[in-house]
Image: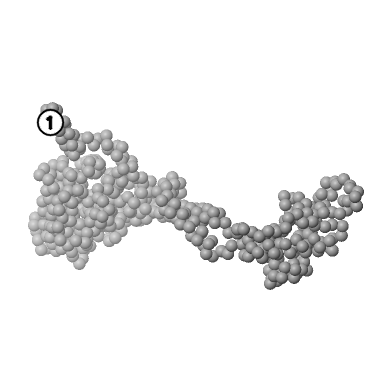
Amino acid sequence: MNEKAYDASNNANDVIEIDFGRIWKAVCKKIWLICIVSVLCAVITVAGTFYLITPQYESSAMFYVNNNSLSVGDTSFSISQGDITAAKSLVDTYIVILKSRACLNDVIDYSGIDLTDVELRKMISASSVNETEVFEVVVTSSDAAQAEEIANAIAYILPKRISSIVEGTSANIVDYAIKASKPASPSYPKNAILGFIIGLIGTVIFVAVRELFDVTICKQEDIERCCSHPILAQVPDMLSSHKQGEYYGYSNKKNTTNHTSNSRKSVVGKDISFVASEAYKLLRTKLQFSFVDEVKCPIIGVSSALAGEGKSLTAANLAYSLAQLEKRVLLVDCDLRRPSISYKLPVDRKPGLSNYLTGHLDIGMVIQNCALDSENHFDVISSGDTPPNPIELLSSTKMANVLKELRNAYDYIIMDLPPVCEVSDALVASKLADGILLVVRQDYCNTVALSSAVSQFEFIETRILGVVVNCVVEDGGKYSRYGKGYYSKYSKYSYASAYAKASKRAQEERRRREK
């Protein structure tokens, strides 16, 4: 492998660039999924809260810390800030006394509840109120009546306990406990919001990480990371999703005569969309400049990294586009394992290339004329019968000799090659070509496969003419640089548009005469 191929492979596999714009677009594209998952998480959280979490009730009693040394009988003394601070510090002391084992046992005996001091300690919390001399004791229980009973027991026991331990101080009751009317926890709105936020953040992270590590080719920069070869054309998606398997992938049909002319003309010939037609004409022009007078009859191989990228469709439309210039064009189906040219064009699969290479037929007997319309036509050599040894046939001396002979009869020879990452037949046949076109399908091929395809062709020193991007979205897709905004200015020159405008003018003229 040469240094250039090695660097391209390393760039595609070792470097991960964080494209925040791409991640943002992926998140926006999946906003419906993010909303659904977030709402679903909120619903699950509320349901789990209802069925799995036991409601807890709270009852509280409030006490005021009193330092008796500040007053004697009816005589009052002025209270300094230090005295107030000393009273506040007593709150912490009272809380420690409250949670002592002796005090808790007194509360248990007084209230008559069936709990241990350890269990009761876990149910009690106490703290000062807004850093004042008032502190609050809160009892939490799954039984509202029990919480109230314990809190009032503490209100009765604690002042007596404090007076017996800390001399000169006392804790006066500010508020007795009352029975709670509703649970203090769990909070259904709070848990629902929490579940929604968790679902939202989790789904966004999932989409972002998935997009970050997604190696699918979806824009020009993805191809430029894999290879330095130019992008020669961008062809829009001409089929709906339910038909793509027939034309972009390998067809499993065995009958070559069951394709209607309408389905064929929708992807090959003059009836394809204006944007697609212009893309193939652009490809044709660039290929003409690629060779100039370098060779008498250029042999152009068309391959792809993976199956299903539209290489056969590109080869057929390129042959038709060259035939429009009144060039003598020959299209050869070299994909002997899983051919598809005969499924796209009005030609028979048999006899074909394999029948000639095995010595059963002469070359003139396997060449078929393909006329997609009355003005333009080109010749086709189909694949023929499926051989057990396709790679040996393609690498044979007879294959090289027949191409050398056919150069004298044609202006261009197009070879439809197998996917290079699927089988090695493409590498063998590409040695017979003057250049290779790599077809890359948007949102289908990945950078690893494309980098591998480029590396393999460069390893055997095959000339890569450039890349044809297939299945580009017309309506402002994330790859296409042209889209509707560019071609809409020139679409008035298409046959369909001109015919529609002429019909409209005729109808208006007819209405004017009738009036």
Residue at (46, 57) in percent of width and height: 40
263 or 133: which is nearer to us? 133
The answer to whether one can see residue 410 in this image is: no
Q: Position of residue 215 (x, y in %)?
A: 39, 54
Residue at (15, 44) in percent of width and height: 323
456 or 349: which is nearer to us? 349
User: Amino acid type of disc 1?
Assistant: Arg
The answer to whether one can see residue 80 in this image is: yes
Task: State the image quarter where residue 510 is shown.
Answer: top left
Q: Position of residue 144 (x, y in %)?
A: 64, 63
160 relative to 345, above or below: below
Which image quadrant: the C terminus?
A: top left
Q: How is the rendered protein coloured?
A: one colour
Residue at (25, 60) in percent of width and height: 425
433 or 309: which is nearer to us? 309
Secondary structure under the numbered disc 1 in the rendered image: helix
Total labels drawn: 1
Residue at (28, 51) in percent of width and height: 439
Q: Position of residue 69 (x, y in %)?
A: 88, 53
Q: Is residue 42 left or right of residue 94?
A: left
- Tell me if mark 1 has few (under 14), some (14-19) or many (20+) residues whose alpha carbon lies within 10 angstroms of its own: few
Task: State the image quarter where residue 106 is shown.
Answer: bottom right
320 or 372: which is nearer to us? 372
Q: Position of residue 150 (x, y in %)?
A: 70, 64
Task: State the image quarter where residue 391 is shown.
Answer: bottom left
Q: Is residue 366 left or right of residue 215?
A: left
Residue underneath mark 1: 510
Which image quadrant: the N terminus?
A: bottom left
